[in-house]
């Protein structure tokens, strides 16, 4: 009885007793979820266009952030005294690196694997993940780094609101992240639905062979889409890095994008966003109100369990259509 | 090979009957109000233009799709919902329109996999693979070798089926279905994509299976010549409805069938 | 020229159904077994036995476990590290509560606990497959990792949060704990791995193996042939987790001598997955070859350049290993998706017809 009370009643009493804490927790869940959503967005982009379930998306986030910070420090070391200049030059260089990465992936991984089963391509991205980890650490060193948020003119500090009889504090960087993420999603949606390349992308996702046969250039599409995913990764990396620091330890967190995808479906951009927010808020609330009951630290697995339970009831995801199996 | 079990139904009696079966996906009607029967030991052809619902029909018969309305009676028992594996246990085997072999396995293993239901040695004997387990394995291998001989595929027993040409794959698939010793064999376009010679071979196999073992066969086929030669009775579907049913000669002369194939505005 | 099967006729289906139908293969296997069981314990150095062979065998067994699930049944799992952990912790608890029962019994029994947990986390395979299932196994991985970390009962409330292997004996011979001789531990590991490999091979050549592969290659067709998907998949989960569990118990009890939860992290799961990708999906031999390559690669990177007077920094070795492993995986998937095992087969085929091309 007491246990039931602690599970089903007490947490809600706490919520009602301190609404400001609830709002604060919700906001933090929202921000965390947005970052998951951004990683998931990178997955979705690539999955839509190449049918590849890109496990390396999380690593691309770290790799992009690491390249940015690493290049910045190199520039400063070799005499660029204006930190803002150095930061933006580093940003440009990183964008270049992401393009080279997209191009190399297309050349060395995707092209030789055209028309292979999905699961083979999936596993190839494991290889890519490991390669990028090794490469990134070899070049820039394995120790955690601090994101150059100030040099990039990103805001810092927090805005405090007095509401609900308490204080809710929002980090400015989080607000900036929310704004930038929304803009990016809007831009991508337009790109996908309105442009010629967007249409081609969708064709390629349905069938490599069929797309080739109507004269769509797979190479161009894949480079474009991996580059786009690289840019999303860069933005994600900057935002994320500004909240904590930049290291490959992030890869475990970046795996959280997988349950997000399950919730939202692999091909839906709105799905990725909504899924990300649900997972982010779900795990924060769960950890804050129910976590202490079982010893805390539940955010390492709660996201997966939420996704799993969800899957059992709706295997096709939030926005997916019911699949009719044919034979 | 032994004759298939289920002797309680004499040749010529109704083995399977469908009454007023309807199947829809969302708003799309795949089958509407179809009734027909399959008699023991006959060759029953299901024909119709593309998209007429022929494959859906087979899927309903072996439990892969559940019809929303209607009644299915198999071996005298009306059945409600049935899972595909239960249908298989009941003695329904089938081949597929697009060959659905186990591509990573050899032809022999594919056909042996068809014996899975008939093999009963449990897990711990399997771990040992000696004594009873090995004896069972060899027993079934003998049976499978008979099928291999019957279909003339001795030379490709140990070849991975993914590497075989299409015609041979179809034959292995037939072998796998035969290995189940079915009472009712469903063949979904067994001759699609074959050249004349291969078609003749396959027709011969189908007739032999029917003759020698008395296996009841329902087949979908587009080649009218083959259908008219092989089948005892033909049912014609169009847009998910039955438009004709009877012996090949009757069906051939049916006005509705001619219209469906030549195209008359609906 | 020596590798010819001419003149070896199979007169019974029993001999045709055997695992090694060609005589030379059987001789080769016998030689390997003699070397492994007799020559190595007598002449192998402690370093070779303890730092190379024992872990190689343990990882091979874990790789076989994952291969049964992923390679043979086609269910991708990213939780094998955690299932190894279940075996290790189960063994630890069992020997704590029943110190009188021989530790070898517990090492094998711990596999059953792992199998049980595996079946539980395999239940979602009822509704989902492919990537979705992979994510479900991630849930297992992270949840179990959390248990190892947060449930003090599992590690007997040790302050360090780690499990430490007590000294246990077999016929008066110390086999676990800090005082056990590497050769003794090696022989035990080798025996268990040999027997379990044999069992796996038997299983894969019989009805159950065919059913698993049928589910892997075309699940719908398998279902229409009367193979019930869920029980088949769950059996695969159970057997696979059993193997991983035993491997985990051996990892801790016969190699490390103690372990913290991070031994069973997601990285361990990945390494084992990589072993079977590189070695060959759906091949027992491949599990060994893959384990050898992935495990021994860092050792080579550490020692070989040092011999030429170019010592590589430990961190650099790690980074290089990551890069090379990553590149190898891509390389194998492109060039030979069936891994080292297929390369070996091709080599044998060439040898059979040598010096002619066909």
Image: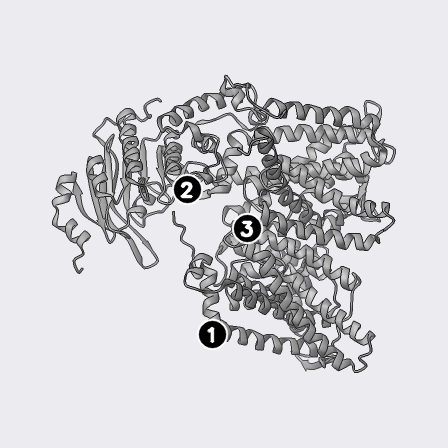
The alpha-carbon separation of the residues under discs 3 and 2 comes to 19 Å
**Between A300 and B180, which is closer to the camera in this rendering?**
B180
Q: Position of residue A54 (x, y in %)?
A: 59, 59
Q: Secondary structure at mark 2?
A: loop
Q: Are marks 3 and 2 in contact (CB under 8 Å)?
A: no
Q: Residue C277, how many percent across, how many down?
A: 62, 45
Residue A28 visible here: no
Alpha-carbon distance for marks 2 and 1?
Answer: 39 Å
Identify the disc placed on residue B100.
2
Q: Which residue is mark 3?
A: A119
Quarter residue C25 falls in: top right
In this rendering, position of residue C44 left or right of residue A190? right
Q: Label 1 near label 2: C-beta < 8 Å?
A: no
Q: Which residue is mark 1?
A: A195
Left or right of A77 in this view: B188:
left
Label located before the other in sequence (3 or 1): 3
Q: Chain of mark 3?
A: A
Q: Is A166 situated left or right of A309 in this image?
A: right
Q: Is residue A285 at least partly visible in the picture? A: yes
């Amino acid at each position: 009885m007491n246990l039931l009370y602690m599970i089903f009643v007490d947490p809600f009493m706490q919520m009602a007793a301190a609404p400001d804490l609830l709002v604060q927790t919700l906001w933090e869940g929202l921000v965390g979820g947005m970052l998951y959503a951004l990683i998931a967005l990178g997955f979705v982009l690539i999955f839509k266009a190449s049918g590849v379930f890109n496990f390396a998306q999380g690593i691309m986030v770290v790799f992009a952030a690491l390249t940015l910070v690493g290049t910045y420090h190199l520039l400063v070391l070799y005499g660029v005294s204006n930190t803002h200049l150095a930061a933006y030059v580093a940003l440009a260089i990183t964008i270049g690196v992401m393009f080279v990465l997209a191009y190399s992936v297309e050349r060395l991984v995707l092209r030789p694997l055209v028309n292979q089963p999905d699961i083979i391509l999936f596993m190839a991205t494991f290889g890519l993940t490991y390669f990028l980890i090794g490469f990134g650490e070899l070049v820039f060193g394995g120790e955690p780094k601090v994101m150059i948020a100030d040099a990039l003119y990103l805001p810092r500090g927090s805005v405090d609101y007095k509401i609900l009889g308490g204080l809710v504090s929002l980090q400015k960087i989080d607000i900036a992240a929310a704004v930038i993420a929304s803009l990016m999603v809007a831009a991508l949606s337009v790109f996908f639905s309105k442009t010629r390349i967007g249409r081609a992308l969708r064709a390629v996702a349905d069938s490599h062979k069929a797309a080739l046969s109507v004269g769509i250039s797979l190479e161009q599409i894949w480079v474009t889409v991996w580059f786009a995913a690289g840019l999303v990764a860069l933005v994600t990396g900057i935002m994320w890095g500004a909240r904590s620091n930049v290291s490959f330890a992030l890869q475990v967190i970046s795996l959280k994008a997988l349950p997000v995808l399950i919730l939202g479906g692999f091909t839906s951009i709105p799905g990725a966003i909504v899924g990300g927010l649900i997972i982010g808020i779900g795990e924060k609330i769960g950890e804050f109100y129910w976590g202490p009951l079982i010893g805390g630290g539940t955010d390492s697995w709660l996201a997966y369990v939420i996704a799993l339970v969800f899957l059992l009831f709706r295997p096709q995801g939030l926005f997916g259509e019911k699949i009719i199996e044919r034979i | 090979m032994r004759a298939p079990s289920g002797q309680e139904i004499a040749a010529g009696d109704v083995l399977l009957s469908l009454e007023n079966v309807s199947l829809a996906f969302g708003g799309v009607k795949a089958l509407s109000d179809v009734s027909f029967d399959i008699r023991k030991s006959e060759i029953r052809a299901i024909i119709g233009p593309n998209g007429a619902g022929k494959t859906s029909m087979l899927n309903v018969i072996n439990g892969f799709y559940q019809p929303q309305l209607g009644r299915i009676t198999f071996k005298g028992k009306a059945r409600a919902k049935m899972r595909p594996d239960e249908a298989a246990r009941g003695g329904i085997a089938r081949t597929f329109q697009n060959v659905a072999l186990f591509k990573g396995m050899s032809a022999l293993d594919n056909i042996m996999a068809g014996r899975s239901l008939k093999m009963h040695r449990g897990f711990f004997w399997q771990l040992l693979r000696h004594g009873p387990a090995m004896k069972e394995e060899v027993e079934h291998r003998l049976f499978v070798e008979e099928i291999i001989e019957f279909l003339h595929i001795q030379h490709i027993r140990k070849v991975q089926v993914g590497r075989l040409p299409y015609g041979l794959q179809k034959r292995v698939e037939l072998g796998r279905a035969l290995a189940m010793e079915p009472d009712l064999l469903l063949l979904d376009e067994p001759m699609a994509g074959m050249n004349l010679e291969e078609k003749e071979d396959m027709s011969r196999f189908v007739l032999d299976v029917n003759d020698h073992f008395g296996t009841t066969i329902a087949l979908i086929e587009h080649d009218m010549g083959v259908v008219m030669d092989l089948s005892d009775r033909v049912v014609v579907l169009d847009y998910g409805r039955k438009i004709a049913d009877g012996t090949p000669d009757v069906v051939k002369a049916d006005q509705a069938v001619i219209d469906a194939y030549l195209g008359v505005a609906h | 020229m020596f590798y010819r099967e001419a003149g070896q006729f199979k007169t019974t289906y029993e001999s045709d159904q055997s695992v090694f139908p060609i005589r030379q293969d059987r001789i080769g296997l016998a030689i390997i077994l003699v070397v492994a069981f007799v020559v190595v314990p007598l002449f192998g150095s402690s370093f070779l036995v303890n730092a190379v062979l024992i872990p190689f065998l343990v990882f091979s067994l874990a790789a076989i476990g994952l291969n049964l699930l992923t390679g043979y049944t086609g269910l991708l799992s990213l939780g094998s590290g955690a299932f190894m952990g279940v075996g290790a912790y189960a063994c630890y608890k069992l020997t704590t509560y029943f110190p009188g029962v021989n530790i070898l019994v517990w090492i094998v029994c711990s596999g059953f606990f792992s199998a049980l947990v595996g079946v539980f986390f395999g239940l979602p395979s009822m509704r989902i497959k492919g990537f979705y299932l992979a994510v479900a196994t991630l849930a297992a991985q992270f949840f179990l990792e959390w248990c190892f970390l947060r449930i003090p009962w599992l590690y007997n409330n040790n302050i360090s949060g780690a499990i430490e292997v007590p000294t246990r004996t077999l016929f008066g011979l110390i086999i676990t704990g800090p005082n056990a001789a590497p050769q003794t531990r090696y022989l035990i590991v080798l025996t268990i791995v040999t027997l379990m490999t044999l069992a796996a091979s038997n299983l894969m050549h019989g009805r159950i193996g065919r059913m698993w592969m049928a589910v892997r290659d075309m699940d719908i067709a398998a279902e229409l042939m009367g193979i019930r998907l869920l029980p088949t998949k769950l059996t695969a989960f159970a057997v696979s987790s059993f193997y991983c569990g035993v491997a985990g118990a051996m990892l801790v009890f016969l190699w490390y001598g103690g372990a913290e939860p991070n031994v069973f992290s997601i990285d361990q799961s990945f390494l084992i997955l990589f072993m079977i990708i590189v070695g060959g999906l759906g091949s027992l031999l491949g599990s060994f070859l893959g384990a050898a390559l992935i495990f021994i690669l860092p050792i080579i990177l550490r020692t070989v350049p040092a011999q030429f007077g170019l010592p590589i920094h430990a961190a650099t070795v790690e980074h290089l290993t990551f890069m090379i492993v990553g590149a190898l995986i891509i390389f194998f998937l492109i060039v030979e998706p069936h891994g080292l095992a297929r390369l070996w087969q091709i080599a044998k085929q060439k040898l059979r017809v040598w010096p002619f091309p066909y």
